[in-house]
Amino acid sequence: MSRILIEVIEMNREEILQKAQSKKSNALDEMELQIVQKGNGIAMFTTLVLCLILMITKIIAKQPWYDVYSIVFVSLGVQHVYKGIKLHRRQSITIGIAYSILAILIVIWYITKILG
């Protein structure tokens, strides 16, 4: 019985080794994927904080601040569209497109406001 168990363990090792060797060299493992995701989260949070600081500064200086919203919305839009395309989720793509369109409209509104 122990001989059969050893054969099963050896077979599982071979399967695992084959899977590891057949893995694409540019594919991320779980740890790398978590690092990328955490980095994206930190980057997005930092962008939001910077936009908040710029918006408050512009409000105090009595300047139009709509451009700051466009930065936030275009970031969210691109993020959702990319996720939707990669994961084949129509809802994410739709939300991403909506955020992107909103960002474009805000930029147009901002430009018309500052140019007169």
Image (spheres, helix red, strand yellow):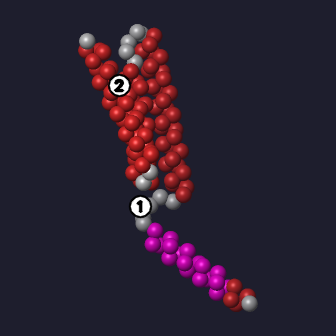
Q: Which quadrant holds the C terminus?
A: top left
Q: Quadrant of residue 97?
A: top left
Residue 63: horizontal and vertical position, in percent? Answer: 38, 12
Image-based side of 105 in relation to 51, left or right: left
Q: Which quadrant holds the N terminus?
A: bottom right
Residue corresponding to mark 1: 26
Q: Which residues are magenta?
A: 6-23
Dominant SS type (magenta): helix
Observer-nearest of 12 and 87: 87
Give the label, 1 or 2, closer to the camera: 2
The reply to whether residue 48 is visible in this rendering is yes
- Indicate which disc residue 10 carries: none
How far, Cα to Cα, is label 1 from label 2?
Answer: 38 Å
Query: Which residue is rendered at x = 44% and y = 13% of the image?
Result: 59
Where is 59 relative to 12, above or below? above
Residue corresponding to mark 2: 106
